[in-house]
Image (tube, rainbow, N blue to C red):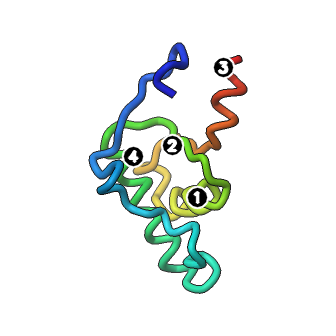
Amino acid sequence: LKSIPGISFVEMKRNRLQARCCGGGGGVQAFIPDTATEMAKQRVEDAIEVGAEVIVSGCAACKDNLRKGAKAIPKEERGKIKIIDITEIVSSSI
């Protein structure tokens, strides 16, 4: 992502080994969907906190769950944050 022209890469405060799970995988979404949505909401809030406009994921389950989490945040708080798959951003840069 850092090598794609025009992209300003921003890390969330909780990243790498300290990153939070979005709740989309591991059966969380299937068995405890309310918890999964809350986990995703918190992850989207992490992105909003650092001023991110887009969250890029390499996992379809994470992308879908992060979108659910974003919808759980009032529009005036979430702004226009987008959640996209990494293939979408790479293909749009070619």
> In front: mark 4 or mark 3?
3
Quadrant in which the C terminus is drawn: top right
Crowding at mark 2 (Cα within 10 Å: few <14, some 14-19, many 20+): many
Return the residue nearer the eye: 78 or 35: 35
Identify the secondary structure beneath mark 2.
strand
Q: Which residue is mark 1?
A: 62
Looking at the image, residue 21 lies above or below residue 34: above
Q: Which residue is mark 2?
A: 55
Q: CA distance from mark 1 to mark 2?
A: 10 Å
- The picture places residue 9, in percent across and down from the top left corner, at 41, 28
Q: Earlier in the sequence, mark 2 or mark 4?
A: 4
The answer to whether the residues at label 2 and label 4 have Cβ atoms under 8 Å apart is yes
Residue at the image point whose x is 35% and y is 38% from the top: 11
Looking at the image, residue 55 lies above or below residue 74: above
Tell me the amino acid under the disc marked 3. Ser
Q: Earlier in the sequence, mark 1 or mark 2?
A: 2
